Image (cartoon, rainbow, N blue to C red):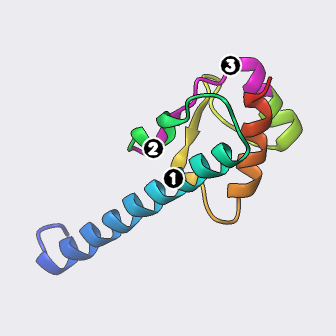
């Protein structure tokens, strides 16, 4: 399929759109956390570029996210940045801000 120039162009455009959306969600999340005056360095949100982001959350913070906010991350605190959307960004911000204050 990728041998077909038109299909490859479509695929490349879709990948580019996804990269841009993930980058935008990372930027908005960082700004929302900064607006809530989270003291920690949030550069990891915009410096990392792939689908996943390492937050540095402890196991206790991960457990709090799950129990109190219904936010699921890997045990090591890795989040799926591709899973961020306009629909869940405020909830993610609230949960992250809360555990970053622990």
Check disc 1 and report the residue beneath it. Answer: 27
Secondary structure beneath disc 1?
Answer: helix
Q: Which quadrant holds residue 89? A: bottom right
Q: Residue at x 57, y 56 (%)?
A: 28
Tell me which label, 3 or 2, sits earlier in the chain. Answer: 2
Residue 43 spot, x, y in % from top left: 48, 36
- The segment highlighted magenta reads 50-63
Q: Spot the residue most to the right.
A: 68
Instruction: Name the mark nearer the viewer: 1 or 3.
Output: 1
Q: Residues within 10 Å of mark 1 (few under 14, many from 20)?
A: some
72 to the left or right of 3 = right
Q: Residue at x 44, y 55 (%)?
A: 23
CB-based contact (under 8 Å), mark 1 and mark 2: yes
Residue 102 spot, x, y in % from top left: 80, 23
Check disc 3 and report the residue beneath it. Answer: 58
Q: Residues within 10 Å of mark 3 (few under 14, many from 20)?
A: some
In this picture, is 73 found above or below 82? above
Q: Spot the residue most to the top.
A: 59
**Magenta stretch: includes residue 51:** yes
Tell me which label, 1 or 2, sits earlier in the chain. Answer: 1
Quadrant containing the N terminus is bottom left
Between 79 and 89, the residue placed more toward the observer is 89
Check disc 2 and report the residue beneath it. Answer: 46
In this picture, is 58 found above or below 2? above
Q: Residue at x 77, y 52 (%)?
A: 91
53 to the left or right of 60 = left
Tell me which label, 1 or 3, sits earlier in the chain. Answer: 1
């Amino acid at each position: 399929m990728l041998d077909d120039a038109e299909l490859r162009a479509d695929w490349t455009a879709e990948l580019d759109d996804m990269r841009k959306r993930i980058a935008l969600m990372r930027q908005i999340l960082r700004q929302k956390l900064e607006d809530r005056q989270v003291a920690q360095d949030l550069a990891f949100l915009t410096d990392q570029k792939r689908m996943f982001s390492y937050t540095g959350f402890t196991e206790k913070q991960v457990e709090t996210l799950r129990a109190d906010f219904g936010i699921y991350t890997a045990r090591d605190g890795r989040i799926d940045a591709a899973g961020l959307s306009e629909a869940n960004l405020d909830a993610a911000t609230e949960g992250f801000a809360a555990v970053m204050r622990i």
